Amino acid sequence: MSSQPYDPRLNIKRSGYTSRGFADRYDIYRPTPPTTLLDVLTQLAQTKRPSLVVDLGSGTGLSTAVWADRAQRVIGIEPNADMRRRAEERNQAPNVLFHDGFAHQTGVPAGTADIVTCAQSFHWMEPESTFTEVARILRPGGVFAAYDYDWPPTMHWEVETAFLACIGQVHEQERQHQVEDNMQQWAKTEHLARLRASGQFRYAREILLHSTGMGTAEGLVGFARTLGHVTRMLDLGFSDATLGLDDLRQVAERTIDDGGVPWYFSYRIRVGVK
């Protein structure tokens, strides 16, 4: 990560996630969490129906809305106004609300949350201050879960190879044109170690799950276009051809049936029990 002082507002601007139309594209092409994840977290929290679930970095609400029928109240905390707008537009559940805020400054009363989640977002958050805030708002025995999915999804070896080649081409263009990576992020591979070292949780471990859906060529290319480095380069004016997206599209259209094929997103869930 950058050695500069943590500035979450500046980080949002650098991410590319505020570009025009990005929130809508993200909402269409990003996956929703598997229902098994909710089963696991409620079991660990020892409650069948949580009184409050707080989703940090809730984005367009994909990871927040899934709790609507499983919890009494759900709060999504999201500082990106465009993402929060999309979440509020798609939300139809009266028990789900979205607030402007940060993971380290949620405004949620102390000891009120049964479960706190970070879906594909914890790597954007300063860990120490986030852990402190999570511990403050969780009740004793409450559960924190920072979870991410691996990409590309498992669907066809040739498509997956083309996807990784596309990402490699994006990074090569960044190198050639000296596009600085000044986004502040923390390695996902270190989430569990930081969770354990925080001293805020009596128990911590990693859980592996997966979700199943139908993947199409359009869906795969659309997903690729929502990734941070790809979005940033598109915003700078680089073409789909230059970034390898056209090549990915050609392979996907040749390989995937028109009706799509099953694809599998593998999830890594780092959980802590307060």
Image (cartoon, helix red, strand yellow):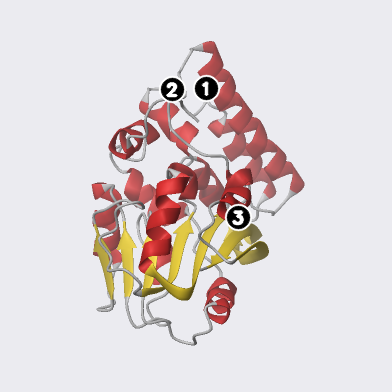
Real-space Cα distance between discs 1 and 2? 6 Å
* Among numbered discs 3 and 2, the one appearing first in the sequence: 3
Label 1: state its secondary structure.
loop
The percent coordinates of residue 147 (x first, y second) are 55, 57
Q: Residue at x 65, y 62 (%)?
A: 205
User: For this rendering, which residue is in front, 227 or 59?
Assistant: 59
Residue matched to label 3: 196
Q: Tell me, yes or no, if residue 62 can be seen here.
A: no
Marks 1 and 2 in Cβ contact (< 8 Å): yes
User: For this rendering, which residue is in front, 131 or 183?
Assistant: 131
Decide: is 159 above or below 27: above
Label 2 environment density (alpha carbons within 10 Å; few <14, some 14–19, many ≥20): some
Foreground label between 3 and 2: 3
Real-space Cα distance between discs 1 and 3? 42 Å
Disc sitting over residue 32 in the figure: none
Marks 1 and 3 in Cβ contact (< 8 Å): no
Residue matched to label 2: 238
* Among numbered discs 1 and 3, the one appearing first in the sequence: 3
Real-space Cα distance between discs 3 and 2? 41 Å
Decide: is 144 above or below 69: above
Q: Residue at x 54, y 63 (%)?
A: 201
Residue matched to label 1: 242
* Amino acid of disc 1: Thr
Label 3: state its secondary structure.
helix
User: For this rendering, which residue is in front, 176 or 119?
Assistant: 119
* Amino acid of disc 2: Phe
The percent coordinates of residue 89 (x first, y second) are 24, 63
